[in-house]
Image (cartoon, rainbow, N blue to C red):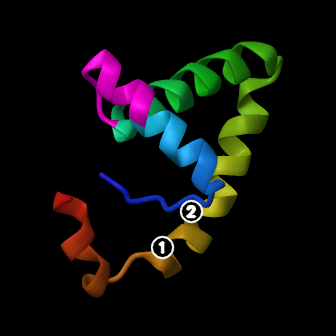
Amino acid sequence: MGVMSIRISEDKRKKLKAIASLEGKSMTNIVSELIEEYVIEAQERLKDKAELKEIMKASETSFSEWDNDEDEVFNDL
């Protein structure tokens, strides 16, 4: 599993944390669900899924440059 860091305002973070707590969820779970929903909707909007696959294939080398042993510690977080 990959790790992603995002920057949001402190006010938004506090609100998200409070809502997540009230719903018995983690902030990570909520963000992950929202990303999943977005990806599904975006794939439906894109008519040519082959184009999406080409873009993902082209970006593999960029992402492999980010993958290193030092970052493995974050995988279990």
Whether label 1 touches label 2, CB < 8 Å: yes
The part of the chain drawn in magenta is 18-26
Residue 16 in the image: x percent, y percent?
49, 35
Decide: is 42 above or below 71. above
Q: Main SS of the magenta segment?
A: helix
Which is nearer the eye, 13 or 3? Answer: 13
Closer-to-camera residue (50/34):
34
Q: Secondary structure at mark 2?
A: helix
Residue 41: image tag: none
Name the image quarter holding residue 25.
top left
The quadrant in which residue 72 appears is bottom left
Q: CA separation, marks 1 and 2?
A: 6 Å
Residue 55 belongs to the span the image colors magenta: no
17 vs 45, left or right, is: left
Please report the residue visible at 59 percent of the width from the left and 55 percent of the height from the top.
10
Inspect the image, locate mark 2, and give the three-letter code of the amino acid beneath it: Glu
> For this view, does 24 lie left or right of residue 55?
left
Residue beneath disc 2: 60
Q: How crowded is the residue under tag 1: few (<14 C-alpha within 10 Å), some, or many (20+)?
A: few
Q: Quadrant of residue 17?
A: top left
In front here: 9 or 42?
9
Where does label 1 land, which residue? 64
Nearer-the-camera pick, 9 or 65: 9
Amino acid type of the residue tagged 1 in the rendering: Ser
Which image quadrant: the C terminus? bottom left
Task: Please tell me which residue is depicted at 68% across the width and 16% down the height of the picture.
Answer: 41
